[in-house]
Amino acid sequence: MNIKKYIAYSKVVETGSLTKAAEALHYTQPSISQMIHSLEEEYGFPLLIRQQHGVVPTAHGEQLLVAMREIERGYAKLTETVDRINGFETGHVRIGAYSSVTTTLLPPLLAAFKRDYPRIHIQLYEGNAVELDRWLMEDKIDMALGTTHNEHWQFDLLMNDPIVAIMHPNHPLAARETISVAEAAHAAFILPHPNSHLEVRNLFTQARIQPLIAYEVKGDETILAMVKHHLGISFVPQLLLQRTQGLAVRPLAEPACRQLGLLTRRAKHTQTPAVKKMIDYIVATIASQQLK
């Protein structure tokens, strides 16, 4: 068994490219090709399908990938445990999060973590709810900071993030102290993409009201920019509003929030020491912030 070959195949599938995998792992592209070819020779069937824009795993390769990644995690856990016994804190942590989290909560938290544990490498992936779910399923990330939407994952609540209404300061609704869902439904509304901010769509679904959709937008920054240019109003999580210049922000008449938490696999024994340390660090840091 050669763990390097498993890591190489896993990275090729993740990146969809032999060249990108080689760059990420600091190998030459021919070396990666040889590792994959060696596995195919050993197993007796192809593992990759070459396409015009990259490579994808074969059906057999998909089946093996799960077991390979389990072995890869086990090897990382072994290596990190040995380093810890020898007095070193090392490892690799892959985090997925919403853009509203990567631009607000995570930067200072990760900076503090890196000061305390400089030898632990961190990879950060930004995505929506559907992407975070898929990345956890594919073992592309070790944890996600998002909302609970899939019973497959362990969900540990970190904070309640209020949903607020935003509009141009000259919008008629800006004169009100609070905004109801019904009132918002009669104004030109900028609705988040179906895979983003599910709580906003749920507000209208629960009220059995169809909003007057002016635009349907995926990016958070795009929503804020369009509201600032008087193209409609919207509902967004308060965490997004670090800079409110050019916006009128009002609480909802029917208070609502999104529950932000940590999504991890239920099998805790598969977590490496570095992943466990990051989980504990995130929980402790955000808990202390909530007390301030």
Image (cartoon, grey):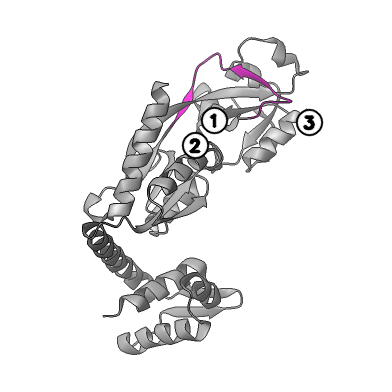
Q: Are marks 3 and 2 in contact (CB under 8 Å)?
A: no
Task: Identify the magenta region.
Answer: 243-259
The disc, 1 or 2, on the residue closer to the chain's N-terminal end is 2
Apparent side of residue 201 relative to residue 157 in the rendered image (left or right): right
Q: Earlier in the sequence, mark 3 or mark 1?
A: 3
Q: Look at the image and say whether residue 65 sits in the magenta stretch.
A: no
Asked if residue 78 lies left or right of residue 212, the reply is left
Residue 208 screen position, x and y as percent: 53, 24
Secondary element at image label 1: helix
The answer to whether residue 231 is seen in the rendering is no
Point out the tag, 3 or 2, that comes first from the N-terminus.
Answer: 2
The answer to whether 201 is drawn above or below residue 176 in the figure is below
What amino acid does circle 1 point to? Answer: Leu
Residue sitting at x 33%, y 36%: 156
Mark 2: amino acid: Leu
Q: Quadrant of the C terminus?
A: top left
Residue type, label 3: His
Q: Residue at x 70, y 24 (%)?
A: 247
Q: Would you name the residue on which mark 2 appears?
A: 105
Tell me the distance, in whole angstroms, between the alpha carbons under discs 3 and 2.
27 Å
Name the foreground residue: 187 vs 23.
23
Task: State the residue at coordinates (75%, 29%).
Answer: 228
The residue that label 1 is drawn on is 239
